[in-house]
Amino acid sequence: METELVKYKALVDKLPQLKKEIAKVIVGQEEVLDELIITLLAGGHCLLEGVPGLAKTLMVKTLSEVMELSFKRIQFTPDLMPGDIIGTEILEEDYSTGKKFFQFSQGPIFANMVLADEINRTPPKTQAALLEAMQEKKVTYGGKNYALPDPFLIIATQNPIEQSGTYPLPEAQLDRFLLYIKLGYPSEQEELEVLEKTTGSYQPKIEQKISAEEILALQKLTREVHLDSSLLHYITRLVRATRLENTSIPEVKNYVEWGAGTRAGQALILCAKARALLKGRFAVVPEDIHYLVFPVLRHRISLHFKAEAEQLDTDFIIQKLVEQVPIHAK
């Protein structure tokens, strides 16, 4: 038992080293990096929203490099087809017999970490091919199943300021993303550091700190992190308080059209456990829940037109939940 604990501790101790290594390339954005690592530990996928020029691609690519994971980037465009993502069959010839046959050629989805850039720029048919792969962790083509690599993480990005010519993801599809991460502008000091490093001769050397096998072990360990029954009940009350039929919160009654489903509670539990592990703990604390309730719930609550008219977003509703739902039941 003691040997197992030492092994687990050594694994968990590698997580801060990951962040330290990434910091050689990415300045600041610690919360976003935490949330990306949490998504990986929890075995889910995430939606990353931010304006152009905030190094989203570089961040994800660097994350894959320090984790010894294969990385692919797919630029979503209006003319992108499902076959451009999952792959297609190519006619081959056996030169020894002269016989021709079809061979499946894997698409860019066959990587440990896939950056789906500007997912809202491609039509629903192509979006569906990606989302099916996310859910099933396999690709079906010509009646055959092709397993995707393990671990498997999709990070989809969308641009919040260009909405013309886009195909917004339906709410049911958004729900398949474990977290909805918002990437903001850097602070003045961070921006100064970025400008200095990227316009000079600075060339950081990235060291690989963790293997795919170790990530799989950490994903298994994440599910074993302790969650007290009182916090389990608290998460249940938070999620149920987003629904009109279960809530007593005035802001929910006034502005929410429909609330979060059961998947939101599952996501909040897994992500809270992953954050506890990231912080070197083997038990969830209320801070973990409060930290993650925003990226877990912000895409799982649909607002009434009245909220739009008053320029309110789902983060406003979530803040009211945190303020008004008690941690301990009365």
Image (cartoon, rainbow, N blue to C red):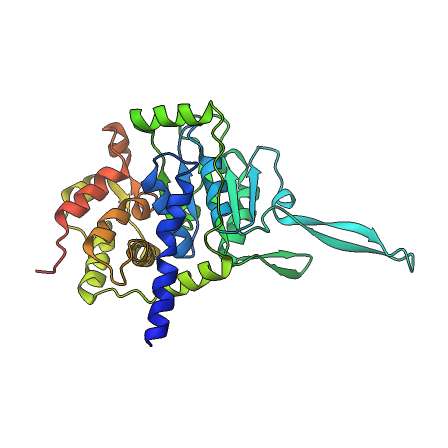
Find residue 151 and report its horizontal and vertical position in percent: 50, 57
Image point 67% across, 60% down: which residue?
A: 143
How many marks the image carries: the answer is 0
Residue lying at the far bottom of the rendered structure: 1
Image point 86% across, 57% down: which residue?
A: 94
User: Is residue 24 something one can see in this rendering?
Assistant: yes
Q: Is residue 316 left or right of residue 118?
A: left
Find residue 247 and report its horizontal and vertical position in percent: 18, 51
User: Of residues 284 and 124, which is closer to you in this image?
Assistant: 284
Find residue 190 and report its horizontal and vertical position in percent: 33, 29
User: Of residues 247 and 122, which is closer to you in this image?
Assistant: 122
Q: Is residue 174 left or right of residue 151?
A: left
Q: Is residue 15 above or below residue 10?
A: above
User: Of residues 4 and 135, which is closer to you in this image?
Assistant: 4
Check the picture and name the quadrant holding the C terminus. Answer: bottom left
User: Of residues 232 and 271, which is closer to you in this image?
Assistant: 271
Find residue 62 and report its horizontal and vertical position in percent: 48, 41
Q: Is residue 106 above or below residue 2?
A: above
Residue lying at the far left of the rendered structure: 330
User: Is residue 36 something one can see in this rendering?
Assistant: no
Splitting the image into 4 quarters, where does residue 185 fall? top left
Check the picture and name the quadrant holding the N terminus. Answer: bottom left
